[in-house]
Structures are given as structure tokens and as C-alpha cells.
């Protein structure tokens, strides 16, 4: 009898533990916890509670996986976390790994400078792919916590002071020197062309084949459709698009599907 009772209690305990572990969620902890509000140096309010790191890292990773879409702002309790990641050595390491993988992929393509026929192409986005917008977010203290003020952001872009994204100048020239034609396809507006060109050259990029920005007609399309239309146009000209690199999923959406895509981390904003 005693043995049966002991076994029953053991199974009951194990079952309860399994259910509790399965149902555990950081959001439930947030409801019951007592968060303290802190303010960053730039005035960003953020909530910090026990285990919030895990929740915010999960949110960030699912943004990168494109599971979380169409968000307009970063959850307020995770703004500090996104800022910490995007300004960390881990972000730079993650970009470097993407660059290393792209270089490995290049070795598997058939394009070599001596053999290329001039029709092998590679597409780069610009913002947070070649040029970093992190200084803008640092100076404005938002890091996704507020909806992007496009007027203010374009004024900053027009200054042409954006630094290069770490390791990307190296990759850019590695691809160019292999004989690929490089096309820069950006959602930036056409009136920013001069500032964009000067900024790119200033930080070390040169030798691209074409810089495509959005004119009035392109501004009527979604960014995803605009970039897909550019790939369609390049394909119609006979180009073989071997790779596309960007920090937003809109760089890869639609047809024709690129042979290979390389996504750089960016959980500050989402542009469809």
C-alpha cells in the first residue's frame, strides 16, 4: 500500500513538473513580476525583470527568422536589448560570419575573373548592409522604440555620414574582384543619389555597375515588389543573379527567387 502511494505521488509530481515546464512563458513571469523602469542615456524607457533577456533574445531571433513580421516598433521592454545587441561585438561577429559564408559560396560559383562573360551579377542593399544606420539610432535614442520618422531619417541620410557596416567593404571588393557585376538596389529615394554615392565612396566602396534608387513610380510600389521587379529586369537582360545580400527580408521576397540569399542581422525596424 505504501509502495503504491509512493509511486502515485512520484508520477503526480513528474506530471505536474512537465506541465509547468511546458506552460512556462516569460510573458507570464512579466505579469506576476515587479518590473523596474530604467532610462538609458538617450532617454529610452525600458522594463527590466528577471529572465527578460531570454524573452527579448527570442523576440529578436524570431524577427531574424521572419517569423515576426510587420512590426512597427520594437516592444518597449526590449528596446534596451536591441540597442545592446546592435552596438555589441556579437553583432559584428554575426555579420562577419555571414561574410565568411558568402565568401565560401563564391568559391562554389562558376564565375572567375578570367572566365566571366560579364553577365554574373550580385545585388547588395545599402542601409544596414553596406552603410550602417546605427549612428542615427544612437543620436536619436530610439533603436526601434518609436516609429521611424522618415523625414528626419532622410535628412540624416542626406548628410552622407554613415559608416560602413563591419566587414562589408572586404566582401564587396572580394565579389567585385572575382568579376561579378555589382548592383546596389536600395529603397532610398532618388533625390538622395548624390549623398549616397559620396557616402559609399568615402567609406571605401567603388566599382559597382549600377545604383538603383526609387523614383516617383517606384515609390508607389511596396519595397518588396520594387526589388523583385529589379531582379526581373536584370534577369531579362541576361544577368545571372548569384546572390542577394540585405538586412531586410524584402530584399529576397517575390520572383525571380535569387540563387542564394544572405541576411544580415537587423531587428531595429521592419520594411515590407
Image (cartoon, rainbow, N blue to C red):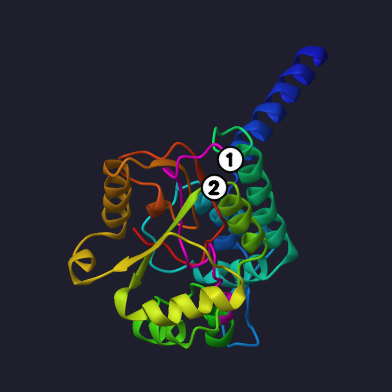
Is residue 133 visible from the viewing direction of this image? no
In front of the other: 126 or 242: 242
Q: Say which element carries label 1.
A: loop
Residue at 52% in and 63% down: 207
Note whether 101 is above or below 42 in the view shown: above
Is residue 214 visible from the viewing direction of this image? yes
Q: Quadrant of residue 60?
A: bottom right
| Residue under label 2 | 179
Which quadrant: the C terminus? bottom left
Q: Quadrant of residue 70?
A: bottom left
Q: Is residue 118 magenta?
A: yes
Q: What residue span does the magenta drawing correspond to?
A: 113-135
| Residue under label 1 | 114
**Quick one: label 2, few (<14), some, or many (20+) residues within 10 Å?**
many
- Asked whether the beta carbons under mark 2 and mark 1 sit within 8 Å of each other, the answer is yes
Q: Is residue 191 left or right of residue 133?
A: left
Q: CA distance from mark 2 to mark 1?
A: 8 Å
The residue sitting at the right extreme is 3
Q: Is residue 7 left or right of residue 205?
A: right
Amino acid at each position: 500500500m505504501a509502495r503504491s502511494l509512493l509511486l502515485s505521488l512520484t508520477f503526480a509530481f513528474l506530471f505536474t513538473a512537465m506541465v509547468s515546464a511546458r506552460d512556462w512563458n516569460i510573458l507570464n513571469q512579466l505579469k506576476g513580476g515587479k518590473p523596474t523602469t530604467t532610462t538609458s542615456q538617450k532617454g529610452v524607457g525600458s522594463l527590466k525583470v528577471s529572465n527578460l533577456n531570454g524573452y527579448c533574445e527570442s523576440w529578436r531571433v524570431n524577427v531574424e527568422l521572419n517569423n515576426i513580421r510587420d512590426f512597427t516598433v520594437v516592444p518597449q521592454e526590449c528596446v534596451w536589448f536591441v540597442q545592446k545587441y546592435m552596438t555589441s561585438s556579437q553583432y559584428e561577429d554575426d555579420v562577419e560570419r555571414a561574410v565568411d559564408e558568402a565568401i565560401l559560396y563564391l568559391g562554389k560559383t562558376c564565375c572567375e575573373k578570367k572566365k566571366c562573360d560579364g553577365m554574373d551579377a550580385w545585388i547588395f542593399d545599402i542601409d544596414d548592409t553596406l552603410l550602417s544606420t546605427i549612428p542615427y539610432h544612437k543620436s536619436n535614442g530610439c533603436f526601434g522604440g518609436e516609429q521611424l520618422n522618415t523625414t528626419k531619417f532622410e535628412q540624416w541620410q542626406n548628410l552622407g555620414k554613415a559608416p560602413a557596416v563591419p566587414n562589408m567593404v572586404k566582401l564587396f571588393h572580394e565579389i567585385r574582384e572575382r568579376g561579378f557585376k555589382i548592383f546596389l538596389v536600395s529603397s532610398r529615394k532618388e533625390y538622395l543619389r548624390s549623398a549616397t554615392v559620396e557616402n559609399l565612396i568615402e567609406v571605401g566602396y567603388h566599382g559597382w555597375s549600377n545604383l538603383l534608387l526609387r523614383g516617383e513610380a517606384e515609390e508607389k510600389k511596396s519595397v518588396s515588389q520594387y526589388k523583385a521587379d529589379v531582379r526581373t529586369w536584370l534577369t531579362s537582360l541576361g544577368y545571372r543573379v548569384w546572390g542577394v545580400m540585405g538586412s531586410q527580408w524584402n530584399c529576397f521576397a517575390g520572383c525571380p527567387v535569387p540563387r542564394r540569399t544572405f541576411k544580415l542581422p537587423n531587428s531595429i525596424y521592419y520594411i515590407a
